[in-house]
Image (cartoon, helix red, strand yellow):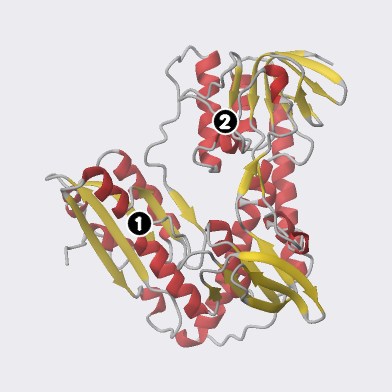
Amino acid sequence: MQRHFDLIAIGGGSGGLAVTKRAAQLGKRAAIVEASRLGGTCVNNGCVPKKIMWYAANLAHAVDDANGYGIPATRGATDWPTLVESRERYIEAINGNWQKTIDNAGITRLEGFARFTGSNTVEINNVTYTADHIVIATGGRPLLPAVPGAELGITSDGFFQLQTQPKSVAVVGGGYIGVELSGMLQGLGSAVTLFIRDEKVLHTFDTILSDNLTEEMVRQGVNIEKKFSVARLDRRAQGIAVTAEDGRQREGFDCVIWAVGRAPNTDSLNLAAAGIHSLSNGIIPVDEYQNTNRPGIYAIGDVTGHAPLTPVAIAAGRKLAERLFNNKPLSKVDYRDIPSVVFSHPPVGTVGLTEAQARERFVDGVTVYTTRFKPMRYALSSHGPRTAMKLVCVGEEERVVGLHIIGDSADEMLQGFAVAVKMGATKADLDNTIAIHPTAAEELVTMKRG
């Protein structure tokens, strides 16, 4: 087997696949190192299986609403094994498609774990390989906190391994993973308690999103325990008990899910052998062109600590390959105004600055437009979340620097409006766009102050 390549990517996730595929298209000898299934966290334990479960919960909500429209429907218990089996079959098809893609592109797959043995050498299964360029794209992993009994809980990885639906679930963490798992489990029929350290979920997001989502999750039946810092887990006869630092205790859970953050997968790479600088938390610092401190070694995706999103890793991989092999020395990712979505129930979409960030950065000249309404989707239903939106504008021209949506189809609405924000659209540009009626999205081009 070939032992030297133009480029080796360590990690078969979104970033590694993107950079090797583009390098191969440009005629370079590329290899990708992966010990598990291709696709990384996104395909196997993240975006894809999560979205399948999110759709399932949405369908369950739709059954609840059907009778209001004169469509007889009664929801029974979720057939969890069928859902899981179908989900895994879909993922396996994606894994297979990726294998075909790299085979057709002439990319060499090196199965195993890589560790650096020098500045341009890695060792995999006791075999040494060299490359002119090495890209670290190993992604991240969910964390377990250092508290007694932490092993009694599972992480998001463990959630996707559940073969039976838990009846009573404790989810620890009010970030995007915590609210996503809580929403889908509640929608599918589990009793969910969400433990958060703050007064509301998604506390780093704009207040219109965090306030409305917290309210909506409670309305849907999620029990939110606020200001609850988990100190320990204990196994009791009636289930797992969760104890807070202040002594409060809740018990009777058959499943506890930790959603308390993620760490980069860099600790086993033997970075020191190549002289690669990393931070104490495992993050590898890079410049705007994805360069590490060592020439010829790069890092992309979650290991860099910048915008840990699948499309960002893909863009970084493609841009890097263009710079290295296609005579585009200025090719790099623009990390400004990256849109993101939280697949909560209802979904949240956000791009640009929060109102607080805008007021801190610009001090004066910040104008805010908001709206909150019941979408027509729930006109004949007693259920259903309200939709809320906010535009954050600055200057006399009222350039839109932040756009935030919570409600049905927020995920689909955001993509087009993110283009407008990226292009520097003003409030007048939105006002001059004819609305599509009747839709929820039309509110974004008809919003008035007050």
Side of 321 relative to 409 (left or right): right
Answer with the quarter of the image where residue 82 lies: bottom right
Above-or-below relation of 58 to 436: below
Above-or-below relation of 430 to 376: above
Instruction: Identify the residue at image location x=70%, y=48%.
Output: 44
Name the residue that disc number 2 marks. Answer: 300
* Towards the viewer: 229 or 159: 229
Instruction: Identify the residue at image location x=61%, y=29%.
Output: 278
Instruction: Identify the residue at image location x=58%, y=65%.
Output: 229
The reply to whether residue 108 is visible in this rendering is yes
Q: Amino acid at mark 2?
A: Ile
The reply to whether residue 436 is visible in this rendering is no
Q: Residue furthest front?
A: 246
**Residue 324 % position (x, y):** 54, 15
Name the residue that disc number 1 marks. Answer: 404
* Towards the viewer: 246 or 435: 246
- Between marks 1 and 2, how big is the CA–CA gap? 27 Å
Say whether disc 1 or disc 2 marks the residue closer to the N-terminus: 2
Q: Residues within 10 Å of mark 2 (few under 14, many from 20)?
A: many
Above-or-below relation of 374 to 340: below
Q: Residues within 10 Å of mark 1 (few under 14, many from 20)?
A: many
Answer with the quarter of the image where residue 362 lies: top left
Instruction: Identify the residue at image location x=54%, y=64%.
Output: 179
Q: Amino acid at mark 1?
A: His
In the structure shown, which secondary structural element does the residue marked by tag 2 occupy? loop
Q: Residue furthest left?
A: 396
**Residue 331 % position (x, y):** 45, 21
